[in-house]
Every structure is written in structure tokens, then in C-alpha cells.
Image (cartoon, coloured by chain):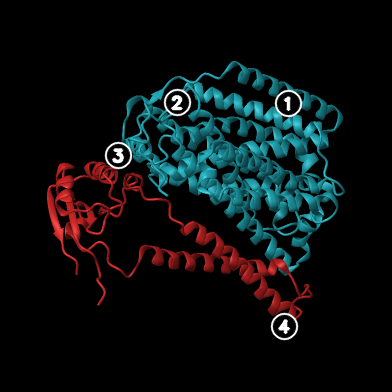
Chain colours: A red, B cyan
Amino acid sequence: MAKKAIGGIAGIFLDEATTVNAARKVRESGFTKFDALSPYPIHAMEEACGIKRSPIPYVTFVAGCVGLLAALSLTYYTSAVDWAINVGGKPMFSLPAFVPIMFELTVLFAALSSVGAFFYLSGIPRIDPPIIDKDITCHKFAIFIPENDVGYSADRAERLLKDLGAVEIKKMAEY
Amino acid sequence: MGSSNHSHELKLSKFEAPQQLKTAIFGAMFIGLLGLAYGLLKAPDRFWTSYLVAFFFFSSLALGGMFFTAFNHAAKAGWSASIRRIAESFSSFLPAMLVGSFVLILGFKYLYPWADPSQAHRLTGGKALYLANWFVILRLAIFGIGCLVFKKLMVGNSLKQDINGDHALTHKNVGISIGFIAFFAIFFTLFSIDLLMSLLPSWYSTIFGIYMLGAMLQSTMAFMVLMIIWLRTSKWVSGYITVDHQHDIGKFMKGFTIFWAYIAFSQFMLIWYANIPEETEFYLMRSHSGWLAVSVALLIFRFAVPFLALLPREAKRNNFNVATVAVLILVMQYVDIYWLVYPNFFDGEPQFGFLEISVFIGFAGIFMKLLTGFMSKNNLVAIKDPRLHEALNHHVTY
């Protein structure tokens, strides 16, 4: 069975500012695959960790355009070509009547594709990193350096996190 | 938090309008006076239609500022605490709005069929009572005075807090804001119906008040974006108003662009589908000769272009891009009100000339005079707001 999560070293922190600062220092010392965990979103964390903008908005835009055109073709084909029915003396191809359907399919395609892209990009259902400490969902913060990171050695990672103010170091084994 | 890339010193000094701006304001008011004199003597019909469009345009900005302040208080928003004073400063036009609506009474007989006794047969059902002169004037007075009272309470509390820093004022403003929103929802709807929809008293549209609300908020956000860019690059404020605030007001501007289009289309589609004579009348007038071009221009330049132009994140953070879209939206707000008023009087071709421009510039002069007066009398930022620290640490995530 494939590995569900890879091991590594986790440092537990007690406050937000130290964690953001530590994340920045970890990135500056050359690690690229590390992760920061927090019970709530921290706005400055993306740039501290060096996370690039997500490509999801582009997926949303393209999927929305596809949805718009799909709805236009669907309404055109069903109402004006395949089964034309005169409704209230309006032309067969009546754009105003089709706009609500075009709007709905734009939203539907865009929303479902965004969720799909999010699942794909975040690797769900993979659990990554492993479960470190239940208090991370409550009042503690963590920085996790996986063992396949660039220039990883358990000693180096442990020393770095300690120096940056981690109150506790946890060795996580793969499972 | 995140202070490394957002390091800025907080600086706030007294605002004083630059000399060129003061000259421009007096010039604008003078041009407005010229328009007034020329219009009243030569073409009172055109003068009053120009007056109505410009009056509604600037009243919308003032009311939009009040509404923005109110919904931010009601939501207990922290991010906007440092830019709330900008919205509050728009309300300095409200006294002029009250005076302006009384001045409008003089123009009733040029503008509204219901003010003409020979047209009384067009007022069926309860309309004869609803559109009786005294009843319209009473509603205008209630709206104008009511807004002033709420301004005195809501904006007044905020100004008082600048001095004594009392947190209780912030809590008090939550209740006042909710009261204002309820008052505003009813009386702004009636205000739009009385001033714009009743130009064609036989026409009904139950969504009209919301249409004007969407237009009002979209244009207010556009004007706020311009003010934010101006102040944030100025010498009076630094650190309090940031690109992140600009970004979020830009998002609001895009949101209300979509909202306006949604309401405009809802109104159009239901009338087009049902095809009832007293409703289609409105769109028939606007779907031939020169008016069709204006109608299509609204769809393109008030919705399609701003919507696509505001989609990228960088477009809202780039001063030039977002300012261009904001100016476009403000122009289209004028065109929208113009499109609601003018086809009732000029059935053939759209008329636009010296009167429209001069009256608009005159109103702009009064608006800017009151606005800069407010800004130089008060702080540019609500410095003792208890939620100010949230606004100073406001970052827009990806």
C-alpha cells in the first residue's frame, strides 16, 4: 500500500508572530516543501512561506466561459433547431430568454471546476503532512519539514526549528 | 504581523484643499451659475431635465456614502475603519440635497405629467393621490430631513469619537445604522419612484428602487476608489489607507457592477417576456433611433467592460487601471440617469449640450466644495475608532 504521508520534523510554536517569522527563516534557509499549520488563517503566511498564487482563478474563468458557450449552444439547439416551439410569438432564437440559463451554467461550470481543481491541486484525499498535534486545531502553531525536502537532515531541521523558537520538536514517522 | 512588506509610518495631517482645486471649484460653480441663468431664461425645459439628472447623480453619491458607513457599522466591520471617514465625508452634500429637492419643486410643472392638471386622466387608481403635489413634497421632505438626522447621529458620533475616544459611540452606531438602513430602504425606493419613475406615470416597475440602489452603490464605490487613490498618494495621510483597502473597494465596485447588471436584466427580461403594454412602453421608447445606442452602451460600458477589466487581481491594485474603470463607471452612472430621464422628453434623438454639461459641473462644484470643507474641518481618518488596528493590519490574501 502506498504511503499515506511522509515523515519529517515538526516544530510546535505558541504564538502567531514567531510562527510567521520562523516560516520566513525556514524558507530562507533553503527548504521548499515545508508547511505551516495554524488553527486559523494568517494573512502574512503566504508570502512568509513563499506560496505562489493559486492557478484556480484561471480554471474558474475558462470553465465559466465554457459554461456560457455550452448553455448558448444547448438553448440554441433545443429551442431553435431540434424542437422549435413558438412561445408567445417570440423569435425562436430569443437571447433574453436564454440569458438566465447561460448565467446558471456559467456559474455551475465555474464552481464545479474550481472545486475539482482545488481537490486536484491540494492532493485530496492524501493526508499531508501527518497528524502532528491535536492542539494545532486549537491554540498551537506548527512548522513541518518533510524528510524529502531539499537538503534535509533530521539534525539540521531540528536545530533550525529550535533556534527559531519552537517549544517542542516532534519527529514524525511515515505511515 | 506581516510588517516586513507593509512597513509604513502612520502619518496624518490636516487636510487643506490645494489652490488649484479651490480655483477649479469656484470655476465650476460659476459655470453652473451661467448654466442656471441661460437655462432659466432660454430653455427652462432643458434646464430642469439637466437639473434632475445632475441632482440625482450627486444625491446618489451622498446617500451611497451614508449607506456604506451604515452597513459597515451594522456588520461591525474592522477592515474599513480607516476609510470610513471618506464615505462619511460624502454625506456633507446631504444639506444641499434637501435644499436641492425643494428647488426641484419649482421645476415640477416642466418635468412631471402629474403636476399638470390637464394630464390628470393618466393617473388611474390610487396614483392621483400618491402623486398629488403635496404628498410628493412631503415624501421629499421626510427623506431629506430624515437623512440629515441620521447623518447628525451616525457621522456625528464618529466625529465625537475622534475627540473623546469613547468606545460606547461605536456600539451606539450599530443601532443607528440599522435604523438608517430600514429608513433608507423604504424612502430611497420612494425617492427614485417619485423623481424618476413618475416621469412616465403610466409605467410600473416594482424593481425600480433596487435598480437605483445598485446604480448608486456602484457609482459610490467608483468615487471612493478615486478618493482612496488620491488620499493614499497625497501628503496628508500615509499608512492609514493602503492598497489593500483600494483592492477591497475595487472588489465592491466589481460586485455592484454585477449586481446592477443582474437587476437591470431582471427588469428588462420580465417586461420583455410578459409584453404588457403599460410596461413595454418604457423599453419601446429606448429601443429606436439614437436611444438604442445609449441602451446598448449601458450594457457594454456599465457591465461588460468594467466586469472584465476588474477581474484580474492586479487590475484592482494598479492605480491607473482601477481609476480608469472608476471614471468609466461614474460616466455611465450619469448616462444611466440621463437614459431614464431624457427619452421621456426627446423622443427622436438624444440631446446633449451646454446646459447638461454646465449644470452637472455646477453641481460637481457644490459637491466638491462641501466635501473639501468637511475634509478640512475633520480628521481624514477616524483615529480613535476601536477597530482601527484591524484596518491597519488589513491584508488581502491571494
Q: Which of label 1 and label 3 is nearer to you? A: 3
Q: Residues within 10 Å of mark 1 (few under 14, many from 20)?
A: many
Q: Position of residue A98 (x, y in %)?
A: 67, 69
Q: What is the quadrant of the N terminus of chain B in the image?
A: top left
Q: Chain of mark 1?
A: B
Residue drawn at the location 58% of the way across and 68% of the way down: A67
Q: Horizontal and vertical percent for residue A58?
A: 51, 58
Check the residue under mark 4 and report the chain it is in. A
Q: Is residue A108 left or right of residue A159?
A: right
* Left or right of residue B224: residue A85: right
- Toward the top, the furthest residue is B19
Mark nearest the camera among 1 and 4 is: 4
**Residue picked out by circle 1:** B32
Label 2 and label 3: CA atoms lie apart by 21 Å
Q: Position of residue B334 (x, y in %)?
A: 69, 41
Tell me the residue at 82%/26% (across/down): B38
Residue type, label 3: Met
Residue A31's tag is: none
Which residue matches tag 3?
B1
